[in-house]
């Protein structure tokens, strides 16, 4: 690689020098061309004067009977041809641009046209006509002489030649400066190349190879190991509690600790491998080995070295590290496999109570493999509509009348069985399917609601949870608009549920996105209120019109007075902000009566006791809203279409 780069630099130098010499040569060619042009123009002017003289001499010879009429006509035609060339020829443009040349040539051309008949009618005996022509010609001879002397001879021509010489000299100086600056530039490039390479391929804090450089080193090591039939071990090292050290002791202490850790790793591995810092508190060690026992021993030595106390100005620190190890070729043949397996082993070591060092085992990768297979299956399920939406009723706490339903995702795979919504969402977000999943859920929910509206339930609304990914991408408003247009659903019938943390990802853009949705007429509900990390100063700016109190606050209403006070405070806060609050039902039989006495507007039918469910069953539904159909078991609140199911479901 170094030889190749040296050849590239040499080629650049040669190309630069060649281009400089070519530019200098072209400059000299221009000077030569200008000089030749000046000379040619001077020659053309002299030739014009010569042709005038020869025509005058032909007239004199005709008068003296030493030449005949044909000679006069020939000289006349040559003179006219010369004037026409100087007046129209491209090569003669520099001459025409000289002062007084263009008017003189045009005047002379017109005069030649007037002379044409007289010249061809001349005879040797017509002395009067010959004398008249010579007298008229004398004026133009005098003009040609003056122009020739003024522009193409004497001091003026020497000044032009001096200017050309000055241009040639300056071109030489420019060339010298260009070559000097180019050489200096190349010298600086070569001088800084090693430093720039070091900065590009090394971590500035620890001096270790960075991720990019380590990939190159590992690629070479794998090729050498394959060629020499040698084993390799990949040790993934991660410090425990490093964030807490940074937060409590400061970044200066954290940086110093990282430098000490890197020095210990370097001293421990020695010349038997390579070390790199992948980022943060994560390091990787590449070890050359003969037997698997060598890798286990090295992992133990690395852990012991890292666990030694670190002296600080105000005391000492005992760092703890987790090490995961994978072996080549036992655990993989490619870089991705070895690094992935080492990372998996480190994950197990970090969550193990028995050991801080873990050798990779094939069974450890089942969870990762399951996620990958689930991603493929989810993509197929989205394409073939194998997912299902269940709809959970949301009702008024006072009257029990259903106000809307919440769409809940369900997936039963023929290969994996029933998969929890949390796992489905995690797989979608980690494999780039979150946007498609959100769009599918929105489309199915809106189409189902449109079907219910057409069946007579035009007061019903649907709530859809929004993934943070589509919110962060800034495509939420466009996607929702397209879905509403495709399903022919009014925007006021749709309520989007977002969490506090989702709206905090990009404060300015999140407010703009939410306001754009509200302008369309879409309802915005703040989900899981009280569980996020957003501030009240941010929440009061959100254009939401519903607030969902998280079920963790409602669960202990019948047993914990503090929970009651907290829920009442949240409801009062929502009321002061002109929001409508909604509570998730709990497993407590006494929750709903207490909630109905507060200012909360709605509850969600997750697990109410029988007497509460009865109110929203056949008789209760007919009483509060006779248009709501019920299932034969007297528990379903809305009957779904063939593509969807609606059941009271606990999230």
Image: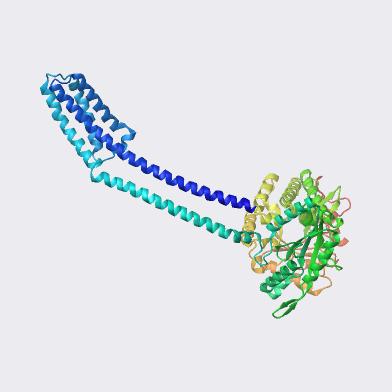
Residue furthest to the right in view is 633
* Number of numbered discs: 0
Residue extending farthest to the bottom is: 314
Tell me where residue 384 sits by quadrant: top right
Taking depth in this image into account, of 282 and 404 the one nearest to the observer is: 282
515 vs 252: above or below: above
Q: Is residue 49 above or below residue 213?
A: above
Foreground residue, 292 or 642? 292
Rendering quarter of residue 43: top left
Judge from the rendering whether residue 180 lies leftward or rightward of residue 602; answer left or right. Answer: left
Q: Is residue 457 left or right of residue 8?
A: right
Viewed as shown, does residue 127 lie left or right of 221? left
Q: Is residue 496 visible?
A: no
| Residue lying at 11% horizontally and 18% vertically, measured from the top left | 125
Residue 21 rendering spot, x and y as whole percentages? 46, 47
- Measuring from the top left, give residue 238's x and y in whole percent: 76, 65
Residue positioned most to the left:
128
Q: Quadrant of the C terminus?
A: bottom right
Please tell me whether residue 40 is drawn above or below residue 472 in the rendered image. above
Residue 12: where, in percent of width, then height?
54, 50
Query: Relative to the observer, which residue lies in front, 3 or 458?
Result: 3
| Residue 290 appears in view | yes
């Amino acid at each position: 690689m170094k030889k190749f780069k040296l050849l590239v630099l040499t080629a650049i130098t040669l190309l630069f020098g060649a281009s400089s010499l070519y530019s200098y040569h072209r400059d000299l060619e221009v000077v030569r061309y200008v000089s030749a042009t000046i000379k040619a123009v001077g020659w053309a002017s002299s030739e014009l004067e010569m042709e005038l003289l020869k025509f005058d001499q032909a007239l004199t010879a005709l008068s003296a009977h030493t030449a005949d009429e044909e000679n006069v006509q020939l000289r006349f035609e040559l003179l006219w041809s010369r004037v026409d060339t100087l007046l129209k020829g491209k090569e003669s443009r520099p001459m025409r641009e000289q002062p007084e040349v263009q008017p003189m040539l045009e005047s002379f051309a017109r005069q030649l046209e007037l002379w044409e008949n007289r010249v061809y009618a001349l005879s040797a005996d017509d002395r009067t006509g010959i004398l008249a022509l010579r007298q008229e010609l004398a004026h133009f001879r005098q003009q040609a002489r003056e122009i020739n002397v003024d522009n193409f001879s004497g001091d003026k021509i020497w000044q032009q030649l001096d200017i050309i010489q000055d241009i040639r000299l300056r071109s030489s100086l420019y060339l010298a400066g260009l070559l000097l600056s180019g050489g200096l530039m190349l010298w600086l490039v070569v001088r800084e190349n090693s430093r720039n390479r070091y900065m590009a391929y090394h971590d500035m804090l620890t001096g270790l190879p960075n991720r990019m450089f380590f990939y190159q080193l590992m690629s070479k090591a794998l090729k050498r190991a394959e060629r020499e039939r040698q084993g390799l071990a990949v040790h993934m090292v991660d410090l425990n509690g490093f964030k807490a050290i940074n937060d409590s002791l400061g970044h200066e202490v954290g940086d110093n600790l990282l430098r000490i850790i890197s020095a210990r790793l370097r001293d421990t591995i020695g010349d038997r491998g390579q070390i790199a810092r992948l980022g943060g508190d994560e390091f990787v060690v590449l070890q050359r080995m003969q037997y698997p026992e060598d890798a286990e021993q090295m992992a133990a030595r690395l852990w012991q070295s890292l666990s030694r106390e670190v002296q600080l100005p105000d005391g000492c620190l005992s760092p703890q590290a987790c090490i995961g190890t994978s072996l080549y070729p036992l655990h993989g043949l490619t870089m991705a496999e070895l690094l992935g397996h080492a990372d998996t082993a480190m994950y197990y070591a970090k969550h193990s109570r028995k050991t801080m060092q873990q050798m990779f085992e094939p069974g450890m990768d089942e969870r990762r493999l399951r996620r990958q297979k689930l991603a493929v299956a989810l993509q197929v399920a989205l394409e073939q509509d194998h997912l299902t939406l269940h709809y959970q009723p949301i009702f008024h706490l006072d009257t029990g009348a259903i106000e809307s339903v919440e769409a809940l995702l369900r997936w039963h795979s023929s290969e994996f069985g029933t998969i929890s919504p949390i796992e489905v969402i995690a797989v979608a977000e980690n494999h780039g399917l979150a946007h498609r999943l959100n769009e599918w859920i929105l489309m199915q929910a809106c189409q189902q609601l449109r079907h219910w509206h057409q069946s007579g339930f035009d007061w019903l609304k649907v709530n859809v949870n929004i993934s943070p990914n589509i919110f962060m991408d800034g495509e939420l408003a466009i996607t929702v608009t397209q879905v509403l247009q495709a399903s022919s659903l009014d925007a006021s019938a749709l309520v989007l549920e977002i969490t506090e943390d989702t709206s905090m990802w990009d404060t300015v853009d999140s407010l703009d996105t939410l306001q754009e949705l509200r302008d369309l007429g879409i309802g915005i509900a703040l989900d899981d209120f009280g569980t996020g990390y957003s501030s009240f100063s941010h929440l009061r700016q959100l254009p939401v019109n519903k607030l969902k109190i998280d079920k963790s606050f409602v669960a202990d209403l019948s047993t914990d007075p503090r929970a009651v006070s907290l829920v009442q405070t949240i409801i009062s806060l929502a009321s002061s902000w002109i929001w409508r609050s909604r509570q998730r039902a709990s497993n407590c039989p006494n929750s709903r009566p207490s909630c109905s006495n507060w200012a909360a507007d709605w509850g969600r039918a997750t697990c109410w006791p029988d007497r509460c469910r009865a109110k929203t069953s056949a008789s209760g539904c007919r009483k509060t809203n006779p248009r709501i159909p019920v299932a034969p078991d007297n528990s379903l609140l809305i009957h779904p279409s063939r593509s969807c199911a609606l059941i009271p479901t606990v999230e």
